[in-house]
Image (cartoon, helix red, strand yellow):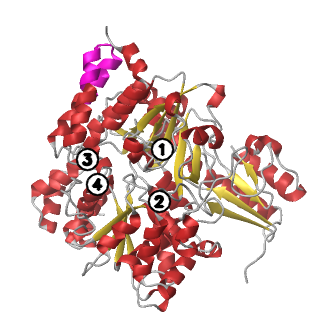
């Protein structure tokens, strides 16, 4: 859906700001909010640009930087940390060849950390886009990453 | 006419079991049952969390009450052929290898007292009729037709129910501030559960969403609100889906909307989705976020009960608090006070995790000791290891070692650590664990989540995180550790909202119970 259509879906009130940003971000391949997007939203809601920017940079689910097709978010809160989220995170860094917050060269994955995902009983856990993965091991991570790569190629 | 089935199979569908492939098992089970010609005799339904965690796909077969765990796709035909056709239990899949009879209480654990979670794991959380079948919405009928709004407030006040979000403020008293005010009023349910290790609100919303809705309608009736909002964290996909479904069904049954059950009372509920900010669990930050702003906390007073969402009076209650309300109204405050302690009646929901034998969800009376929770309900430690400490309440939580394990879990007995009850997270650490690493992980978390509005928190959380990293590297001295304690105390005194005030709890309790662990890592 293009941006104009998304905006029209909502009444132009400030209360809808988070929803509009969610929708615009999800509609884009690079999973981020561009300067253009923020300006358009600011005009539509009649809220200053700095306010819109302030909101977009406050919440961890929004990004103003281009990201990959899939966002990998590793939970680093204490229960996961206890069960080895460091190992998981380092393994992902190695496998994907990126640091925290970076995107792979082929634009497939962006690696991020996340606070508690609420599935602590299967720690360590991570989320890829909206899908949750738990009880992670290096083998399992390989499997998951391969699955996403194959999905794209196949 | 409703069909009568000889057997009911309930498959737990929650994020954890979904990960293990519960959806596939559910479909396959239905198919195999059809193939075996048993569709008219056996019903397969989805349910919420069954109180067993870390065991893959979990399902229960009634009336026998047999729990199967770690069910894989290839096991389905065995369950159908052996158990359902021949009545022979598939022993190697049974939880702990023995037959469990009766309630959803799992093996070897003492019976829980369920008020909030009653029916969770037994009924289909999407089906309103099943909730009605276990006495759902009786309280609402009673309130609307036999009680005046002020009677509802009075009943809740007398029940002694205290806010389960952490502060432990008396719920009835909170309502009584808002009830006399004029104009548009709101009920806001705080479901922005972000405390690390905490997922009890998620399980309540996934297991018994209708009870939460009923509690909210009752709250709305009591204070004269016309509209309710449930603010759920953006990461909680399934909760959002289940709650939205429940709202839709309630509208169809005239339990929400105009003139509920043909009374004069009208009330509606909307779901609001968060976008990932821990600080939004603070009630005024949550309201700011609902208004489309950054989640910066507001000055108090005025409290939300007087000036909240859209500057109108808004009662903000936690999921667990509201879910307690229906049974209080239905059975009366006297009944409610028969659970828990005198000053802290009722039950509390906990999530157990870490090095514990039975990770998962429990609901026990207020005042149950930490020892009983870990060793009786949680089965003790995994692999017979020795207990080192428990972190109670997530990041803003307290470390308690063997020395303090007899503490009663209620708002009064926990004293200065009372706030940790809100989250209900209990993370158990065995003797093999380095608790300093856990403390570090907490301090890194606070640094990340500080909203930056006030300097004590913005700068303080950063300083604490640097110090803590240095301890792990062996670069810190005893003076640094003393400085951390002092700094967290200053932050407690000067920070604007509970976020900056919180690091004091883990640091202070660590110093009280686990100081030797830190000292071992210091540079002498």
Q: CA distance from mark 4 to mark 1?
A: 33 Å
Front position among marks 2 and 3: 2
Of the numbered discs in the image, which one, if any, rests on residue A63? 3
SS at mark 4?
A: helix
* Circle 1 residue: B425
Cβ–Cβ below 8 Å for labels 1 and 3? no
Viewer-proximal residue, B443 or A26? Answer: B443
SS at mark 1?
A: strand
* Circle 4 residue: A25
Residue lying at 40% horizontally and 35% vertically, measured from the top left: A76
Q: Is residue B476 visible?
A: no
Residues tagged by mark 1 and mark 3 found on one chain of the structure:
no
Give the residue furthest to the top.
B524
Q: CA distance from mark 2 to mark 3?
A: 32 Å
Viewer-proximal residue, B135 or A9? Answer: B135
Front position among marks 4 and 1: 1
Of the numbered discs in the image, which one, if any, rests on residue B314? none
Chain bearing mark 1: B
Percent coordinates x, y for residue B223 in the rendering? 35, 77
Viewer-proximal residue, B269 or B244? Answer: B269
* Circle 2 residue: B320
* Magenta: main secondary structure: helix
Chain bearing mark 2: B
Cβ–Cβ below 8 Å for labels 3 and 4? yes
Q: Is residue B473 visible?
A: yes
Percent coordinates x, y for residue B48 in the rendering? 59, 58
């Amino acid at each position: 859906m293009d941006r104009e259509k998304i905006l029209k879906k909502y009444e132009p009130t400030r209360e809808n700001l988070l929803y509009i940003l969610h929708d615009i971000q999800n509609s884009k391949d690079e999973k981020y909010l561009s300067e253009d997007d923020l300006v358009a939203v600011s005009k539509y809601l009649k809220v200053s640009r700095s306010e819109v920017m302030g909101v977009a940079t406050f919440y961890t689910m929004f990004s103003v930087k281009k990201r990959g097709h899939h966002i990998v978010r590793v939970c680093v809160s204490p229960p996961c940390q206890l069960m080895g989220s460091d190992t998981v995170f380092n393994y992902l860094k190695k496998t994907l060849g990126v640091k925290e917050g970076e995107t792979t060269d082929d634009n497939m994955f962006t690696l991020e950390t996340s606070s508690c995902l609420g599935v602590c009983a299967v720690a360590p856990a991570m989320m890829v886009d909206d899908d949750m993965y738990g009880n992670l091991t290096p083998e399992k991570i390989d499997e998951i990453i391969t699955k996403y790569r194959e999905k794209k190629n196949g | 006419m409703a069909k009568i089935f000889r057997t009911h199979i309930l498959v737990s569908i929650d994020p954890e079991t979904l990960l293990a492939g519960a959806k596939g098992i559910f479909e396959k089970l239905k198919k195999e049952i059809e193939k075996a010609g048993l569709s008219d005799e056996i019903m397969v339904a989805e349910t919420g969390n069954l109180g067993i965690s870390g065991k893959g796909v979990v399902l229960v077969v009634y009336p026998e009450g047999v729990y199967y765990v770690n069910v894989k796709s290839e096991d389905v035909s065995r369950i159908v052929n052996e158990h359902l056709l021949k009545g022979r239990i598939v022993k190697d899949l049974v939880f702990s290898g023995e037959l469990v009879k009766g309630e959803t209480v799992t093996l070897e654990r003492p019976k829980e007292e369920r008020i909030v979670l009653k029916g969770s794991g037994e009924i289909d959380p999407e089906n309103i009729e099943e909730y009605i079948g276990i006495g759902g919405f009786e309280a609402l009928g009673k309130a609307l037709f036999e009680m005046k709004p002020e009677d509802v407030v009075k009943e809740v006040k007398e029940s002694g129910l205290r806010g389960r979000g952490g502060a432990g403020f008396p719920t009835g008293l909170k309502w009584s501030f808002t009830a006399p005010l004029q104009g548009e009023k709101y009920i806001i349910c705080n479901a922005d559960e972000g405390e690390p290790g905490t997922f009890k609100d998620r399980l309540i919303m996934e297991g018994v969403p209708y009870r939460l809705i009923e509690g909210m309608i009752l709250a709305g009736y009591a204070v004269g609100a016309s509209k309710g909002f449930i603010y759920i964290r953006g990461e909680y996909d399934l909760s959002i889906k289940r709650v939205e479904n429940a709202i839709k069904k309630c509208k169809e049954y005239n339990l929400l909307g105009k003139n509920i059950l043909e009374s004069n009372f009208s009330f509606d509920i909307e779901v609001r989705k968060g976008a990932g900010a821990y600080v939004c669990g603070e009630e005024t930050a949550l309201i700011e976020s609902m208004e489309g702003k950054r989640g910066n906390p507001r000055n108090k007073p005025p409290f939300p009960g007087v000036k909240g969402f859209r500057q109108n009076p808004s009662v903000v209650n936690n999921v667990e608090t509201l879910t307690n309300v229906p049974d209080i109204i239905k059975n009366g405050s006297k009944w409610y006070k028969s659970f828990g302690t005198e000053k802290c009646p009722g039950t509390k929901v906990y999530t157990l995790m870490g090095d514990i034998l039975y990770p998962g969800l429990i609901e026990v009376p207020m005042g149950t000791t930490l020892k009983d929770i870990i060793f009786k309900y949680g089965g003790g430690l995994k692999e017979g290891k020795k207990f080192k400490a428990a972190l109670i309440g997530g990041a803003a939580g307290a470390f308690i070692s063997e020395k303090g394990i007899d503490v009663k879990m209620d708002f009064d007995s926990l004293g200065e650590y009372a706030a940790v009850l809100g989250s209900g997270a209990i993370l158990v650490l065995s003797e093999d664990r380095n608790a300093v690493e856990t403390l570090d992980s907490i301090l890194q978390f606070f640094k990340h989540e500080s909203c930056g509005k006030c300097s004590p928190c913005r700068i303080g959380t950063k300083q604490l995180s640097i110090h803590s990293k240095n301890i792990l590297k062996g670069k810190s001295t005893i003076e640094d550790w003393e400085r951390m304690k002092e700094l967290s105390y200053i932050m407690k005194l000067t920070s604007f909202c509970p976020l900056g005030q919180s690091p004091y709890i883990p640091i202070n309790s660590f110093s009280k119970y686990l100081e030797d662990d830190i000292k071992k890592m210091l540079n002498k």
